[in-house]
Image (tube, helix red, strand yellow):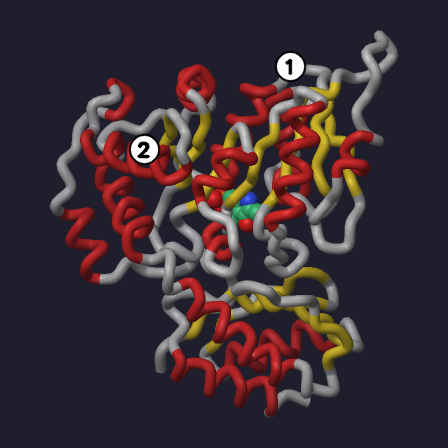
Amino acid sequence: MKIIDLRSDTVTQPGDAMRKAMFNAPIGDDVFEDDPSVNALEDKAAAMFGKEAALFCSSGTQTNQIAIKVHTRPGDELICDGFSHIYNYEGGGIAFNSGVQARLIHTKDGIFTPNEIRERINVDNVHFSRTSLICAENTVNKAGGSIWTKGALEEISTCAKEVKLPLHLDGARLFNALVESDYSTKDIGNYFDTISICLSKGLGAPVGSLLLGDKSFIKEARRIRKVFGGGMRQAGFLAAAGHYALTNNIDRLKVDHLHCKKIASVVMECNYISEVLPHATNLLIFKFKDAGLTPRFIQHFAEAGIKLVSSGPTSIRFAFHLDVSEDDLIRIENALRSFV
Ligand SMILES: *Cc1c(COP(=O)(O)O)cnc(C)c1O
């Protein structure tokens, strides 16, 4: 029986065409900046977003943490949402790597407004931490993959320019937002000073993220990547997979979103579930009426050959991705209906 893995959209296996691209990749030493496959990937991504330069890194945590380090000094403060990955899931890296503290905005979906930013900018006074960065996330993971509208992005971008603060985007799942929205990669490049995108989530590459920005930012980011131990040598094998993913795997994300909506409609009929979060993209988060059900539910799914993890004491997240097929939905539906 095929194992269906819904734990995350990071669990995908490269297909034959991606493996071939990796196998045939021309390589060099990327610390000397002469790996042709890494350079081609960085150039492609920078061009897509209308940015001057890009940097290939090992993970989305690394791209975000490098961006924070470059934009701030120890003792500074950054503004982000309480749902954000940089705050919740990067091991306290804001403090650990940069000596920076986070000023949180509390929203219901990770999407905030210029007013909420302005209220949190400290005045220039020796008592206060210096506000030096604003970070947004799109889609918002912890809120169930919620999408920023074009209007909301334009508003925070204008605000950031007015208050003269850099605006960073954690776009680990940005392409999930783009395929459902009326803004383009070039628009995103205009709205944000720096951008992180993941190649190893819905796009299906085995490893890697990209950090985008202007030349001077990326020059400094390259230095920080080395200091953080992230300078890779013949990384072209990995970059070739990322290049393949960026070229071939964006449009099909819509299929994952469709699968997510189909299963959501079944979940909403299950009487043991108390709440289903909005599910605009590929993530489906739901809560049980009774916390005791969580481990039993995971066990029930394991017996049906479906891997799950809890996303909280009473909640589960299903992540849909390119290794979940239309046929697999039947087994997921049956497991949902046969649980009591
Ligand atoms: C997954 C994710 C990241 C980066 O995670 P890595 O596992 O370090 O690649 C960053 N931000 C968000 C919103 C994510 O979901």
Q: Quadrant of the C terminus?
A: bottom right
Q: Position of residue 334 (x, y in %)?
A: 53, 89
> Can the viewer see residue 140 in this picture?
no
Describe the element under mark 2 as helix, strand or loop: helix
Tag 2: amino acid: Glu
Q: Earlier in the sequence, mark 2 or mark 1?
A: 2
Q: Nearer the viewer, residue 173 or 307?
A: 173
Using the rendered view, name the quadrant where residue 124 is placed: top right
Mark 1 lies on residue: 73
Residue 159 left/right relative to 320 = right
Q: Is residue 171 visible?
A: yes
Residue at numbered disc 2: 42
Q: Secondary structure at mark 1?
A: loop
Q: Quadrant of residue 26?
A: top left
Q: Quadrant of residue 85?
A: top right
Residue in the picture at 61% in, 85% down:
266
Q: Is mark 1 within 8 Å of ligand 1?
A: no
Residue visible at 73% across and 63% down?
A: 313
Q: Seen in the image, is 96 located left or right of residue 206?
A: right
**Tag nearer the camera, 2 or 1:** 2
Q: Nearer the viewer, residue 220 or 304?
A: 220
